[in-house]
Structures are given as C-alpha cells and as structure tokens.
Amino acid sequence: MDEREQIGWRAADRKSIHERIFALRVRDLRVSYEELLVLDGLDLELERGELLAVLGPSGCGKTTLLRAILNLVPFSGKIEIGTSKLGYMPQRDTLFEWLNCIDNVALPLLLKGIDKEMARKTAMEHLRKVQLDDWAYNWIYELSGGMRQRVSLARALVTGAELLLMDEPFSSVDAQTRRSLQLLFSHLVAKEGISVLLVTHSVEEAVFLADKILLLTERPAKIRSTFYVPLPKPRGIETLSHQIYQKLVSEIYREIFSTV
Ligand SMILES: Nc1ncnc2c1ncn2[C@@H]1O[C@H](COP(=O)(O)OP(=O)(O)O)[C@@H](O)[C@H]1O
Ligand SMILES: [Mg+2]
C-alpha cells in the first residue's frame, strides 16, 4: 500500500456513482476572452454537502470558472447545477456603506419581493449564524475587515443557498482573522450541509477546509491533480497538527514546485 492509500486519499473513489448526489458537475469547460484561452477543458464534480477547493496560481482562470458557473461569460462544455439556490461571495465584498449590517444582509430578500419585516427577521437569523447579531444596526464602515467578510457570508446565505461559490473570500484579512473566519465557516457549512466551491490560492486554506482539492495549471487552466482530504469535519485548530493535514500541505507544495 503506498503512502497515499494509507492516508486515505482515494476515499471518495470508494463510493459508487449511484450513491453520489451532485451539487455541481462541469464537463469539458472552455472559456476564452476573445483570443485569450483561459479555461482549457475543465471537468469537476462537487457532491452535495462537500467542499471542493480549486487551487491555482494567480491569473490562471479561477475567477473565470466561477463566472462561467454563474453564466456571466460565454463558455463551451456542460455545467449542471443540482440546485436553484446559489450563493456567491466575491473576492472583494460588495456591501453598501450607506446601509447598516442587517439591511445589507436583507437586501437579496427585498430584491426577491419579500416584505421588509420578514426580510429583516431572516437577515437577523443569518447575522446570528456569523456571530454578528450584536452589530445588526451598525454601519458597514464601523466594521473590521473580518466582520465585513462575515456580513458578506451572511448575505450570500440569506436566500437559503444550497451551493455556495466563493472567490478567495478570506484573502483580504490578517492571518489570525483569516483562521477564525475559516473555523466559523467550517462549522457553519458542516452544520447547514451546504455544498461549497471555494476558489483559493492558499494551499493551507484548501487543505484546512476542503474535502477535495483540484490543483489547476497555469493559464490556460487544466486540472493538474486532485487530492482528497480525509480529515474529520468540522475542522478545528487541532486539524493543523494532524498528520494528514501536514502531509497533504507538503505534498501539494511538492507538486506545485515539481516542474519549476
Ligand atoms: N473580462 C476580461 N477580459 C479579458 N481578459 C480577462 C478578463 N477577465 C480576466 N481576464 C484574464 O483572464 C485570465 C484569468 O483571469 P482570472 O479568472 O481573473 O484569474 P484568477 O482568478 O485565477 O486570478 C487573466 O489573464 C486575466 O487577465
Ligand atoms: Mg481571481
């Protein structure tokens, strides 16, 4: 048995295709911006309740992958989404400075025509989930970077999202805040059973949060390797000292730098 088998990297392969329910399936996805080929035939599968991290160098096409899934750019290939309830958390938050926290979170509900009282009640429940209910009536400019990201997360989930697309959501905050956001996030999505496609350029973040990791090549992006992360969820601080965590982080770095 090789080392990879020992730490269970192939665990997901043991499930038969009939036992899997997919939140997202992408086949032979190609995207170009005019002459520039960005995604060159990507295949991916995200099972319901799973967190799939897409890891790749800057400029390889990670954001473009999310844009294609959101149908914001023309593409060829096939994208099947197993739910109509999509949430999206962009890299830079798009919170409105002139609204308080609760109204920022309530906004997607108001846009759907839900009345204000109901929308605020649901928004408050979601602020509680990200531990910001005490800040509901504060203005956005009063919040720290990490708190803004928590409000963004609450807003991405407020319409009952079953599939959450995230674009480097924790990259704009300091290391300690980033870790506490990851911990909160890991608990929240595990509890709610949300499927997540997480784009990141951080190897450590991918291993810390994901069930499965796709490593992309430089642009035009293809899938370079797939890694399974058989660590118990939700992840905690103890995950960092787990042998599987440490082995995977170094294995992925070895893979990234193997051709340099
Ligand atoms: N709207 C656009 N028009 C033309 N080129 C773009 C556009 N958006 C992104 N690109 C280019 O496509 C490539 C992939 O971009 P992106 O998906 O943002 O990469 P990543 O998110 O991995 O950093 C980059 O070379 C970028 O300059
Ligand atoms: Mg990007």
Image (tube, rainbow, N blue to C red):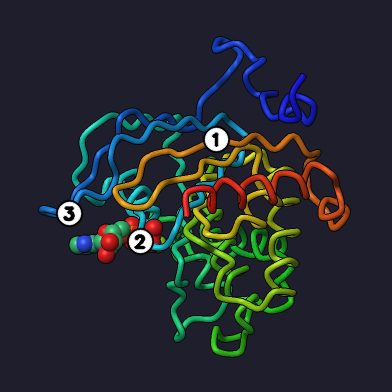
Residue under the image location 60 percent in, 11 percent down: 16
Kindly identify the amino acid type of the residue bearing the numbered disc 2.
Answer: Gly
Give the alpha-carbon distance from disc 2 to disc 1, as whole Å: 20 Å
Q: Nearer the viewer, residue 214 or 19?
A: 214
Q: Is residue 38 visible?
A: yes
Q: Which residue is mark 3?
A: 36
Q: Quadrant of ligand 1?
A: bottom left
178 or 55: nearer the viewer: 55
Question: Is the residue marked 3 within 8 Å of ligand 1, measured from its CB?
Answer: yes
Q: Specify few, some or many for label 3: CA neighbours under 10 Å numbering under 14, 14-19, or 20 or more.
A: few
For label 3, the SS is strand
Disc 2 C-beta below 8 A from ligand 1:
yes
Q: Position of residue 33 (x, y in %)?
A: 17, 54
Badge 3 or badge 2: first in the primary sequence: 3
Q: Is residue 239 left or right of residue 53?
A: right
Q: Residues within 10 Å of mark 2 (few under 14, many from 20)?
A: few
The residue tagged 2 is 59
| Disc number placed over residue 226 in the picture, else none | 1
Task: For mark 2, give the secondary structure.
Answer: loop
- The amino acid type found where label 3 is placed reads Leu
x, y (%) of residue 190?
Answer: 72, 43
Question: What secondary structure is found at the residue carrying circle 1?
Answer: strand
